[in-house]
Amino acid sequence: MPLTNSRDQSLRARAAEVIPGGMWGHMNARALGPAYPQFFERGEGARVWDVDRREYVDLMCSWGPNILGHRHAAVEEAAARQRLKGDALNGPGEVMVELAELMVATVAHAKWTMFQKNGTDATTACVTIARAGTGRRKVLVAKGSYHGAVPWCTPSLAGVTQEDRAHILHFDYNDVASLEAAVELAGSDLAAIIVTAFRHDIARDQEMPTLEFARRARELCTAADAALIIDDVRAGFRIDLAGSWEPLGVRPDLSAFSKSIANGYALAAVTGNDRFREAATKVYLTGSFWCGAVSMAAAVATIKVLRDTDALPRMIEMGERLRQGLQAAATRHGLSLRQTGPAQLPMVLFDGDPEFRLAGAFCAGALRAGAYFHPRHNMFLSAAHTKKDIDQALDAAEVGMAAAADIATSGKSVA
């Protein structure tokens, strides 16, 4: 249960007076349960502290952006140097060219890049560029996939018209026949197929793309002269620095990046090949803060650390350590887990738990014991996670598993 008379509760009450619902979107703690804090004071490495100064091993990494850990020294130093010069100026700083060159040198398919502020900006820009480059309208989207929070792709229908989605067609992720049928339905009006780097829909098992599916998506786009777009907003740089489908040998025409590229500073990017370079010059994409130089300096530092260190292998190693420890804890408590997707982007669900009662009890117990897990969303590892951090998270998970086992055997409600 939440602490009474806490600073978090006081801030919630104040927020409710001046913010619709007190909080909006995916960071609304009410959707997670009463044990979760809404407001945080600070982060350091792989830890976060809420406004009541309770410390947690952070297994969400700000919902993905902190790939090197909170307040990474090299990133903060680069951002501070640029901040002394300026951030939002009358045009971009020199650092934009350096970052663009670094993105093109890092991402395998990229011949150019453009910058935005968040993932929705980037995915929407990709779709716009694809339509401009092909002169067509239809965009194929996997059922249940999340590509952002604007009318063409938002999971909520509130305020959305049928016209907003008139040219969106759906297929099933990893289902080649379904994809082929959607392409046939689009016919000569196919502008693009957009797919997430792997299937990371909320509240369900994750799926890595099959080689057959990835190759067929590429073949279909090539045959139709349409754009293959990879939404790498969530997975970008956590699977492969060159692009999440590069290990499959499949290169997109356009990719959307955000979250991890500036280690917590607000930035997004579209990368593209020469087929869509001219289209990218014709569309009107802009924002008052899109050329903020501080975030770009942070991104240069972030990518160089990822490139020059063993950050990614360490994330994978710590993810495997977490995965094995969670499985062992579940077995000790007579619970059955499903752990899917990349170890560095872990999804943990309980068998026989359609209403997420066991997951809620597990997360609430672990939270009280000092680890921040999520009951229905994939989580994130950072390069800052150490064996000590993971082992402390597993100690907290032991408390959570006991709480989940109690719910499973007694049928009690989650407190």
Image (tube, helix red, strand yellow):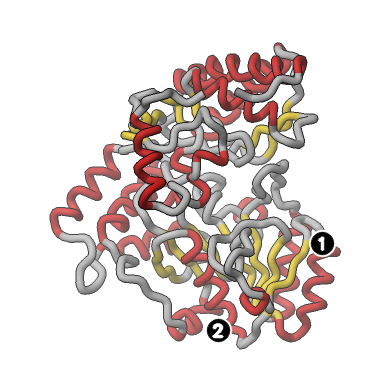
Q: Callout 1 environment at 10 Å: few (<14), some (14 to 19), or many (20+)?
A: some
Taking the image as shown, residue 341 lies to the left or right of residue 93, namely: right
Query: Could you say which is closer to the camera, residue 411 or residue 354?
Result: 411
Q: Is residue 40 above or below residue 87?
A: above
Residue in view at x 71 percent, y 43 percent: 204
Q: Callout 2 environment at 10 Å: few (<14), some (14 to 19), or many (20+)?
A: some
Taking the image as shown, residue 87 lies to the left or right of residue 347, namely: left
Query: Could you say which is closer to the camera, residue 57 or residue 367?
Result: 367
Where on the picture, by quarter, is residue 99? Answer: bottom left
Q: Residue furthest front?
A: 17
Taking the image as shown, residue 325 lies to the left or right of residue 126, namely: right
Residue in view at x 63 percent, y 51 percent: 247
Residue 93 x, y percent position in the rendering: 23, 66
Residue 171 x, y percent position in the rendering: 77, 64
Which residue type does callout 1 highlight?
Val
Where on the picture, by quarter, is residue 145? Answer: bottom right
Q: Is residue 335 above or below residue 264?
A: above
Question: Are the residues tagged 2 and 1 within 8 Å (C-beta)?
Answer: no
Choose the circle earlier in sequence order: 2 or 1: 2
Residue 196 x, y percent position in the rendering: 63, 57
Residue pointed to by mark 2 = 132
Where on the picture, by quarter, is residue 415? Answer: top right
Secondary element at tag 1:
helix
Secondary element at tag 2:
helix
Which residue type does callout 2 highlight?
Ala
- Residue 176, disc: 1
Query: Could you say which is closer to the camera, residue 291 or residue 375?
Result: 375
Q: Residue furthest top?
A: 332
The answer to whether residue 263 of the structure is visible from this angle is: no
Residue in view at x 60 percent, y 41 percent: 377
